[in-house]
Image (cartoon, grey):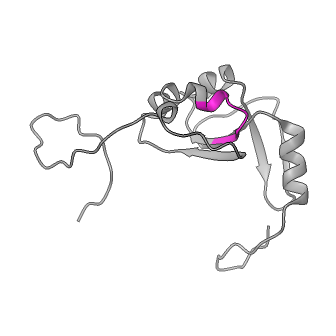
């Protein structure tokens, strides 16, 4: 059984389930600080375009997304890519950027660094019970 979610681009494929689509800008924006993970099977730019007001708001502190197609759009919205080391709990702004993997984008480096430094440690449930 294939349980992967994909956008149907084949009009002859009738084995589909229609879903209602909305935009981030048409939904309620939470006034609290949040992190947004975007993973919409290649439609990341569409998701960002439907949420420009949302992403420009002060409530969105960070975005995680994969690939480089959306990097310039996120930069235009006030974000920049960073590296995060969970073992040292440090966030740094790289001199160069290598796209292709999930990337964290933030707006305020000092705030993100402080949050990482002071956040409560917790156990990640892995085979090695790594504490970050």
User: Where is residue 131 drawn, in percent x and y?
Assistant: 79, 73
Q: State the residue at coordinates (57%, 38%).
A: 100
Q: Which of the 4 image quadrants contains residue 92?
A: top right
- In the picture, which quadrant includes the C terminus? bottom right
3 up-or-down from 10: above or below:
below
Q: How many marks?
A: 0
Q: Is residue 55 magenta?
A: yes
> Looking at the image, which is closer to me, 72 or 47?
47
Q: Is residue 56 left or right of residue 83?
A: left
70 up-or-down from 118: above or below:
above
User: Where is residue 2 drawn, in percent x and y?
Assistant: 26, 60
User: Where is residue 23 drawn, in percent x and y?
Assistant: 44, 33
Q: State the residue at coordinates (82%, 69%).
A: 121
Q: State the residue at coordinates (53%, 30%).
A: 51
Q: Which of the 4 image quadrants contains residue 109?
A: top right
122 up-or-down from 99: above or below:
below
User: Where is residue 4 drawn, in percent x and y?
Assistant: 32, 55
Q: Is residue 40 left or right of residue 109?
A: left
- In the picture, which quadrant includes the N terminus? bottom left
> Looking at the image, which is closer to me, 53 or 31?
31
> Looking at the image, which is closer to me, 56 or 31?
31
Q: Is residue 44 left or right of residue 4?
A: right
- Part of the protein shown in magenta: 54-63
Q: State the residue at coordinates (29%, 40%).
A: 7
């Amino acid at each position: 059984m294939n349980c992967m979610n994909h956008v149907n681009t084949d009009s002859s494929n009738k084995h589909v389930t229609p879903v209602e689509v909305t935009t981030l800008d048409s939904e309620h924006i939470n006034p609290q600080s949040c992190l947004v993970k975007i993973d919409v099977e290649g439609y990341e730019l569409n998701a960002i375009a439907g949420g420009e007001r949302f992403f420009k708001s002060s409530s969105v502190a960070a975005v995680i997304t994969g690939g480089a197609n959306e990097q310039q759009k996120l930069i235009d919205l006030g974000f920049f890519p960073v590296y995060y080391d969970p073992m040292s709990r440090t966030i740094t702004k790289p001199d160069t950027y290598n796209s292709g993997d999930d990337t964290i984008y933030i707006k305020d480096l000092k705030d993100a660094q402080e949050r990482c430094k002071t956040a409560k440690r917790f156990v990640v449930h892995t085979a090695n019970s790594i504490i970050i």
